Image (tube, rainbow, N blue to C red):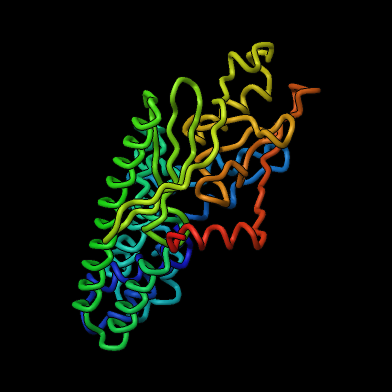
Amino acid sequence: MDIVTQGLLGGITALAGSSKNDARIATGAGFAAGLLADIDALIISADDPLLNIEFHRHFTHSLIFIPIGGLIAALILWPLLRRRLTFGRLYFFTLLGYATHGLLDATTSYGTQLLLPFSDERIAWRIIAIVDPAFSLILIVAIIFGWRNRKALNARLGLVLAAGYLLFGVWQHNNAGEATLRLAEQRGHQVDRFLVKPTMANQVLWRSVYESDGVFYVDAIRLGLFSDDRIYEGGQAKRFMLELDRPNLKQDSALRHDIERFLYFSHDYVVADPDRKNVLIDVRYSMLPNGLKPIWGIDMNEASSTRHAQFVNYRDRDSFTRGRFIEMLLGN
């Protein structure tokens, strides 16, 4: 989730557990603690471009790390707040704020390793977009009223509304999944696996990707609340399979290791970029809900398998792409 919303949720959760006397301090402490887990985004290496995607949403987002993360946040804030409340009370607020971060990230599609060190599975419930203004607005309104009135009740009501919005995302996710299976059945495809995810800043237009016989099919689905669903058919691409597509890569080569890391990061939703040689892309994401133009991928230097692959971002936000997205969102 975006960093501001992470702070808002941390702040409102701490506020919900506060009293009138410490409501404002609780909000600030929870807000700060809600940001702290993303410190793992600073784990980078000039020699290993994939290190960042490997460790972002890693151990600092794990459920078992919550008490430690809350303690670190409290220790950072203690010199500033030691005259305002006890350390135990401060730790309680930072614990509440920190606890929300990994769980909120898991509601998106990126993948969060909540169960480390017991499991390295990247959990992604895909019920809300990375940026969702409606969800953020609920938190903003609740935190403003709670801060002004110093009432935990306002924060608790905000949390109930936020939870209701996430439950709406669960319902929409189920609807999009059923629409995907119906579409595949109409095409005569046997679905091996599929995913659906909300597109940026809404719960109406969803990206659908399913695999059938080694091929990914990408479509956009506009879920009709009071009308029929609308399908915007997209493209298809053959799934990348390491052993078949790069059989000669040495087992111990840096490039092979990087490809395996990218496959893991992408939940194995990887295809070769049709427009760029030696580039593998994450087919879960595209600027258009039914498109294959990538948001990110890895550029393989196959001339030297001892060198690391480069992680590359492609953010082509041209006017056509923006216009087409809005047309799909409005159901045109």
Q: Could you say where residue 283 lies in the image, as x and y percent from the top left?
A: 54, 38
Q: Can residue 317 be seen from the camera position used here?
A: yes
Q: How many marks?
A: 0
Q: Is residue 186 above or below residue 25?
A: above
| Residue at 21% in and 77% down | 152
Instruction: Tell me which residue sits at (48%, 34%) in the image.
Output: 217
Quarter of the image with the N terminus is bottom left
Q: Nearer the viewer, residue 166 or 14?
A: 166
- Percent across and percent down for residue 313 are 66, 47
264 sits to left or right of 169: right
Left or right of 67: which side holds 315?
right
Identified at 36% across, 32% down, the residue is 186
Front position in the image: 222 or 154: 222
Query: Where does residue 254 sit, x and y in percent of width and height?
Result: 68, 24
* Residue 119 in sight from this viewpoint: no
Horizontally, is 161 left or right of 46 in the view? left
